[in-house]
Amino acid sequence: THRPAALVSVPANRPPAGDFAADMLAALAARPRCLSPKYFYDEKGSALFDQICQLPEYYPTRAELALLAAHAAEIAGQIGPDAEIVEFGAGSLRKIRLLLDALDHPVRYVPLDISGAHLAASAKALQRGYPGLSVLPVVADYTAALPLPQKAGGAARRVGFFPGSTIGNLSPAEALAFLKQAGRALRGGALLLGVDLVKDPSVLHAAYNDAQGVTAAFNLNLLGRANRELDADFDVSGFVHSAFYNAPLQRVEMHLMSRRAQRLRVCGQSFAFAEGETLHTENSYKFTMGGLRELAVKAGFEPGPAWTDPQGQFCLHWLQA
Ligand code: AVI
């Protein structure tokens, strides 16, 4: 039966603008200065991220799409018939189509994302392509809580899909907490988790320092967003995008670095930046096969098959909940 996509807003879990203000003020007051990457994804940031995914240097999206296309039948076999699929951080919903096309009668698709307007538009477009599928978008900060509706009536099992190596944007403690929570919500089902793998640092460096400067614009948009949404007066041209691979910590770090000594105001408070001082805006952890399995076991999952490409760029893990 055709059911129109309804946008379920979960106010308690949707970070209100106030959180951005409070978190930005706290970040500016702290040393080192560090803000959650979840604030990248306003409408403009989500659109810039979609552009990043098309960049020649940003291999993870292409690598994961190729894995999904190559192994769709096998993955669909693991998922089984009449499943409900819950996607975390659903973004523009390109990857799910590869799965949906291979699945045997999926019952319902529940995409969760922090960016409400972006999610609503993507869910609507997806619904048009799959008129027989129930699509239930949920606006939520899934790092805070998982406000999942009851499993759909008639669903044989609930399978989570967390692609894009978005788990790498969480700290190790946050990633463990998220996985524990997801494991509880998916009990009896499984999680299909996509992670970026540790590799040649020059490949990682290029992926976060693209020639067209889209990643720089994505990073700097955070300051633009602060100027638009908070009472802030960042001089965006006074900061530069800085991204590098921190090998001992197995992560790419993104920072906004002050080009000069400057003062600025946010919500009536004044802050000083020294020349070269940074606001740390993102970590993107990279994983080894063994490291990810260890983390999954710690969170209560039983690792199953894993699919990776011949160059070892990216890996999809099947984790039994
Ligand atoms: C969404 N996330 C997995 C991306 C990443 O690679 O960590 C975000 C991103 N940051 C810069 N480029 C892409």
Image: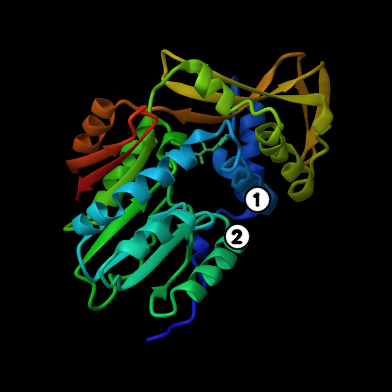
**Mark 2 and mark 1: Cα distance apart in space:** 8 Å
Q: Hey, what amino acid is under mark 1?
A: Ala
- Specify the quadrant of the image occupied by residue 274: top right
| Viewer-side residue, 141 vs 197 | 197
User: In the visual, does 30 lie left or right of 303?
Assistant: right
Which structural element holds mark 2? Answer: helix
The reply to whether discs 2 and 1 touch (Cβ–Cβ < 8 Å) is: yes
Residue located beneath label 1 in the image: 47
Question: Under 8 Å from ligand 1: the CB of mark 2?
Answer: no
Q: Residue furthest bottom?
A: 1
Which structural element holds mark 1? Answer: helix
| Viewer-side residue, 140 vs 118 | 118
Number of numbered labels in the structure image: 2
Residue located beneath label 2 in the image: 118
Q: Is residue 300 visible?
A: no
User: In the visual, does 200 lie left or right of 115?
Assistant: left
- Residue 129 in the image: state x and y as whole percent: 48, 72
Q: Which comes sooner in the sequence, label 2 or label 1?
A: 1
| Viewer-side residue, 310 vs 9 | 310
Q: Hey, what amino acid is under mark 2?
A: His
Q: Residue at x 24, y 50 (%)?
A: 183
- Residue 268 in the image: state x and y as whole percent: 80, 39
